[in-house]
Image (cartoon, rainbow, N blue to C red):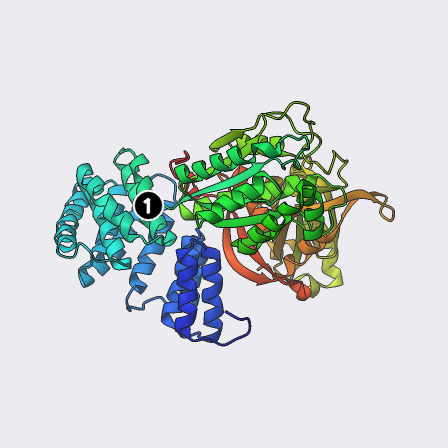
Amino acid sequence: MPPHAQHGASEWLAVVKAAERDGEFFRAYDAARQGLSEHPDDLPLRHRAVLALARSGATEQAQALYRELGLEGRQETDIPELEARLLKDVALSAPDGPPRVELLLAAADKYEAVYRRSGHYYPGINVANLLLLAGQPERSAAIARRIAAELTAELTATPTAAGEEQFWAAATLVEAHVIGGDMAGARRALPAAQAASEGDHARLSTAARSIHNACVAKNLPVDWLQAISPPAVIHYAGHIIAAPGAAGRFPATAEPSVAARISDLLAERNVGFGYGSLAAGADILFAEALLARRAQLHVLLPFRLDDFIKESVRPAGPQWIKRFEACLANAKSVRYATEDEYLGDDTLYVYCSRLGMGLSVLASQHLFAPIEQIAVWDGRPAVGNAGTAVDVDIWRETGRPQTIIPIAPEHGSQLAESPSRSASNSRRSARAMLFGDLRGFSRLTDRELPIYVTGVLGAIEHVRQAHRSKVLLANTWGDGLFMVFQRANDAAECALALQAALSRLDFAALGLSVALSLRIGGHLGPVYETLDPVLGQTNFFGAHVTRAAHIEPVTPPGCVYVTETFAAALALEHSQVFACDYVGMTKAAKGYGSLRMFLLRARRHASEQGSRYAIAV
């Protein structure tokens, strides 16, 4: 839709559903909020905004939005089910034990009330699923068998029906057979559900997750669910191709065989989403193959466009520039790790690769889809700070599935990653930064400032000391706080510790008339690390420091907001420890623009990760 144009609520709803169909729940939520800014009383848009946020995994945020939008107590179609769905999500993320069982049964009660009122199979199968997970298999199976009998008769009467209702009927029949103990029936019902899915990733994600949970609860295999699961997500990587007649790690003569192997693998894995860069050679071959099968191509560029073409596309020959432009024009999304110049900093390539890897992991978690890295690699180490070997090692250390397409370099080829660049000393390094601000500070009197220094800043210093081996820089000014870390997980751990420390302070007992609250913004990006001649110590500079500084002012008190790059870094290597819940496109301070923002929190339970049978399909 054109920006700043008014549209009807039904038009906005269509945009939201299109984004959901593509599996882009962040975009669906943002579209719903835009629609609500024009049509705040539209119930379907309110419902869809909460649903999109819930599908992204931001359960607590979705519950808060449910209340904010005035949906509590509403009995219109789908609203009571939405409330039950939110309770189910809370229960599924809880650790094993009696409290989790209570939450599961509470969600089952909500669904059962809807089921009794409507008689519809969908709330009914959720009752059966939740009772199974709560340890009531007999009651669960009885409900499931009743639903299976009803749906079998219904689907037999309308075998050629299509559309969303047909999909949910067929998928529910699969789930009912699983819960009822009829695995042969479940397998027979699977093709009809697959045929009725119409490529809707939101439908597939919801159905696959629910049936998967039932299979796990009954100790059944899950590999057979591939047919009803969302398409796989890949992170792709590989060597830049040599110009025709030139030597290189990826000889031009190997292009046909590599392209064919890429195409075959994407088909075998049923890949629907690809994340990676767009250098001449392997990257573009992956991009072309993804587009050829109508999969989503998400491009990550390490620095500004003209520099990237100069460094990573043009040296392979002018024909690759045209192919690059065609892929870029048809990409689902294009992100820049930094929009600044290259300046010979090879670590920008690594930063970009890590961003792509993290985004692919986030996508697979939200979609409940298989994930894998596929790389075109000659098996030899990288030269310098960056290269395919580095990307392969980073992914391999996460323990996720990986496939290598080998290349045998031609005789006499040079051990260089790119035909145009050699290893260089990096001037910028990717660092995680926190900016904090204490709300209420301006209302303190001069008499209270010494108390603030010893009591409040003292508490902050106590946290810094506990993390001192990981803190590269810590600075304060009045109510401000700036901290820098080498890794996102260290920054995340410290940020949450700071919030916990401030929440424990009794400000009145300290002698302060104002209860202060801390808000923290976090970002990960390439910055300069150099001696500050004024301070006489190491400091950090660059556009990404500025970006980090503009996040904190729009962060709610008591919260930690982080950017998409920060969230992606945590998803790649620390998804079992931290969760980043989407809060929407947020306008940064002082007209800096809008950024995708996430609420950082500690993960309550491993089940929150939403990871699926962790092998590539």
Q: Amino acid at mark 1?
A: Ala
Badge 1 element: helix
Q: Where in the figure is residue 390, as x and y percent of width and height? A: 62, 32
Q: Where in the figure is residue 296, as x and y percent of width and height? A: 47, 50
Place residue 391 in its image quadrant. Answer: top right
Against 154, residue 524 (above or below) is above
Quadrant into which the C terminus falls: top left
Front one among 551 and 389: 389
Q: Which residue is mark 1?
A: 208
Q: Is residue 531 left or right of residue 13?
A: right
Q: Where in the figure is residue 508, as x and y percent of width and height? A: 61, 57
Measuring 39% from the left and 62% from the top, which residue is drawn there? 17
- Residue 131 visible, this angle: no
Against 96, residue 412 (above or below) is above
Q: Where in the figure is residue 414, as x and y percent of width and height? A: 70, 27
Front one among 218 and 74: 218
Measuring 45% from the left and 49% from the top, which residue is drawn there? 295
Front one among 558 and 158: 158
- Residue 138 visible, this angle: yes
